[in-house]
Amino acid sequence: MLSKRTVCLALAGALMSGAAAFTPAQAAELKAEVIHWWTSGGESAAVKVFADQFTKAGGTWIDTAIAGGANARTAAINRVVGGKPPTAMQFNTGKQFDDLVAGDLLRDMDALAKAQNWDKIVPKPILDAVTRNGHVYAVPVNIHAQNWLWYNKAVLEKAGAKEPKTIDELFATLDKIKATGVIPLAFASQKTWERGLFNSLLAAQSRDLFVNVYTKRDVALVKSPEFRKVAEAFGKMRDYTDPSSKGRNWNDATALVITGKAGMQFMGDWAKGEFNAAGQTVGKEYGCVVVGPSYVMGGDVFAFAKIKDADQTAAQDVLAKTLLDPETQIKFNAKKGSVPVRTDIDVSTLDACAQTGAKLLSDPKAQAPAVELMTPATVTGAVEDVISQYWNNPSMPVDDFLNKFAAALKSDI
Amino acid sequence: MSATASASVPARSGAIEPAGRKPGRISVEMIGVYAVLILAALAIAMPLYVMVVTSMKTMPEIREGALFALPSRANWDAWVKAWTSACTGLTCEGIRVGFWNSVQILIPSVIVSIAVGSINGYALAFWNVPGSKILFGILLLGAFVPYPIFVYPLVRILSTLGLYGSLPGIVLIHTIFGLPVMTVLFRNFYASLPIELFKAARVDGAGFVRLYLKIMLPMSIPILVVAVILQVTGIWNDFLLGLVFAGRENFPMTVQLNNIVNSTQGEREYNVEMAATMLTALVPLAVYFLSGRWFVRGIASGAVKG
Amino acid sequence: MKPRRFLRHIPGFIALAPATLVVLVVYIGCVAWSIQISTTNSRILPSSQYVGLRQYEILFANERWLTSLQNLVIFGLLFIAIAIAIGFLLAILIDQKIQGEGLFRTVYLYPFSMSFVVTGLAWQWILTPANGIEKVVRDLGFPNFRFDWIVDQQMVIYTIVLAAVWHAAGLVMAIALAGLRGIDAEIWKAIRIDGIPKWRAYLFIVIPMLKASLATAVVLLSISVVRLYDLVVAMTHGGPGIASEVPAKFVIDYLFERQNIGLATAGTTVMLVTVLAVLTPYVYLQHRRSLKGGHA
């Protein structure tokens, strides 16, 4: 009857497609459960690129999305400890998976790194961030620059100001915007973004100072005149924000720039998503610029737990390979708003900000690792607390701030 | 709010009849009572009002920042989106995905934790088991430990037991964490009951189990209602424990809610967030509303004593 | 007599056995474990390298931790007192045989059903000067009206109290109402016969009979004080600066985001010792009272 014929056809179809993929037996087994924290509309579209590419490569993507990096990492680490590890898990580029490496719980990806020539195509700070004791333990998938300045073109035009390239120009632009009665700096006064603003200024001052302060954690550097200048500039920034910035979410600050209630905002390149969601285009309604010499790079990686099951290991291999595939990289990063980790691919299809980013990225003199690539989370946190205290207490003397900052750098056990 | 609004009005002695007076008689005193109740209700409802109007606005309207303004038109898109199509990861199917998981976790967890708590409370209040005071003291103290501390060791314990990442596992976890509060709740309630009741039943020859089932449980209705409120809310709104212990097949609805509201770098839609929160709260709200009649029945249980 | 006494306790022992097991394994076991961790240099996973009291030194040199402790005291006292006062008042008013009792009860209780993650955001908006209550009152014709506690480092903790009371008052009402509904009809009859004014009856006769409800409410509220976390995260993120930080947030931040379980467990140990110091006199008093004439 009909059903019999359908079954036959389906069977034949399955066999043929299986033959086409050349791995009929394996195709059914390549299941990869991936824990990640990409849950918003734009992020969802981005992660779908990975899932689709993995499906094309013959795999089945099992999605475990948990918003909030700390939440997702808690779940992932507990899964590993509890003996039910996921196939792959997301971390931020940096030190978040150090303990898992030390506990011998992660697979090394040396073979893949060699096959794909990572040492040639991945920027050094990013490669260093996934390397422990000479072995590569995670696959970086994107680069998010954290020190972009976003501005409303109409507001800048009206104020007769231009896109600032240095700290001095930044203050000149802020003053001009202030004169027009618009909030000069859209700010979200929460610890993370207070730290973000400070580090953007530090990186704008000098790339070397920025890197050395956090890697060497040397008190003398914190007490240097150059660092003090940054601290003072940071303090001055308070005059360009509105009182309601306290506790505000970053996207609400972006909304101020979008609606022209404020002129500019320092934020990572994920802010692009908000502009796009509001129907604006770069170069038309808004612009982006990196102030100063450094391009501060963070981003995301996937790490792979050691799993005894051979099918799972096979799935890990296929997935890891897919992530850095040039086509995947371009498609994914276009959706995510970030820049590909490969410097050897054509980025002309990406938007203007991403293209600027990709250009800066390939310049070793501009490459600066994000703070979380340089310091353990506990030090990053302690520094963040100090920056926040200073920002919210205008009467705190700069010297107090510098002392506390130095102490926080040394707060690691 | 003024406590004197109702208290300073001299009460006519005939009016004092809290348990049994027919409603509907209007006195100065009752006007005061209603005035305070309504004012309190309005104050408490204010954030809900903000959430409801925000959920009905469009994002450009929200960006304008007129918090208390009514939406330009009644617009339920955000509610539909929150329930059916908001992105929570690879798929965009809204918060409904975890609804049944939450129900599956909720029902056994509430029943088991309340049963255990009430039996403990009963044993502690009436039976004076040696060592029970120390047990109670430690249990009470245990309630104060922030529970993220327990997460790592409990992961190890449950995976040894083979319960990690399973439905029985998460039910056990909710029972463990509900134990201190449930025990305190029932112990205190039973301790306030007249001891004569217990003694009389003992003289009649009632044993541990019969006394509990025939006498204590029927008297516990008002406190059972409170226990249900506490556990339903606590377990329904739990995120961390469900996330860590339930396993990905059993993720509760709060995981989806969190995925909608907590994305750090993604664009945010406040109208959908507000709607999602209110949708998630519907189950506890329904339970509160329906538990009302049992509360009133508490009066009847009081009358039994007379 | 002795064997009989023992036999009498058997059902009790059986009933309390699961709780005993949980107390031994989870509460005592895990707390002991976390105290041990606090003497090591553990990051995300437990390490065995002993560092003595070093984590405690770091902890008490940390300004944020000290501020957190101070906030906990201010918040705890105010929150418990106000939530109980309002909750009991509402319960007494609801107990006046009013119309629409179910509706009022649900309205008072609804905040308790909602997760703080988003209601905290609503509160933040309401309290933010530029678009919240301050703006509304100013627009009504009071241009000098100020209500900017949430951005004021000195006052921000009181806004947390406000939102927390909003959240919990309904629960206190429910507990008090459960107590009121458990009061013997005979007592009301006696009060009626004696012609005692209602407010005096409540103040001097009925409320003292609700001691157990009160104790329950205090315990529940105290637990939520010590665990206070979500609300702060959603409303202020601990800011401005570190002005509204609380201990549980410190612990959870270091446990997860800051990946330092050594310091986090040192924090919980201090919290636990503090609670113990407050609770011990209370438990001792209870014990003495029950010796004088409790149940059974």
Image (cartoon, rainbow, N blue to C red):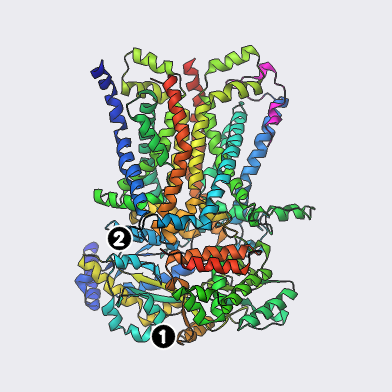
Is residue A211 placed above or below C15 in the rendered structure?
below
Is residue C108 placed above or below B265 in the rendered structure?
above
For disc 1, the marked residue is A343
CB atoms of marks 1 and 2 within 8 Å:
no
| Along the viewing direction, whichever of B165 and C28 lies nearer the viewer | C28
Q: Residue A80 carries which label?
A: 2
Q: How far apart are marks 1 and 2 (CA)?
A: 33 Å
Q: Where is residue A235 shown, x and y percent of the image?
A: 63, 70
Q: Say whether residue B8 is magenta.
A: yes
Q: Based on the displayed image, in which of its 4 quarters is residue C81 positioned?
A: top right
- Residue A403 vs residue A264: left or right? left
The overriding secondary structure of the stretch rendered in magenta is loop
Q: Where is residue B12 shown, x and y percent of the image?
A: 70, 18
Q: Where is residue B300 shown, x and y percent of the image?
A: 49, 21
Task: Describe the element under mark 2 as helix, strand or loop.
Answer: helix
- Residue A60 vs residue C258: left or right? left
Q: For the residue marked with disc 1, what is the amino acid?
A: Thr
Magenta-drawn segment: B1-24
Chain letter of mark 1 equals A
Evaluate whether residue A245 shows in this view: yes
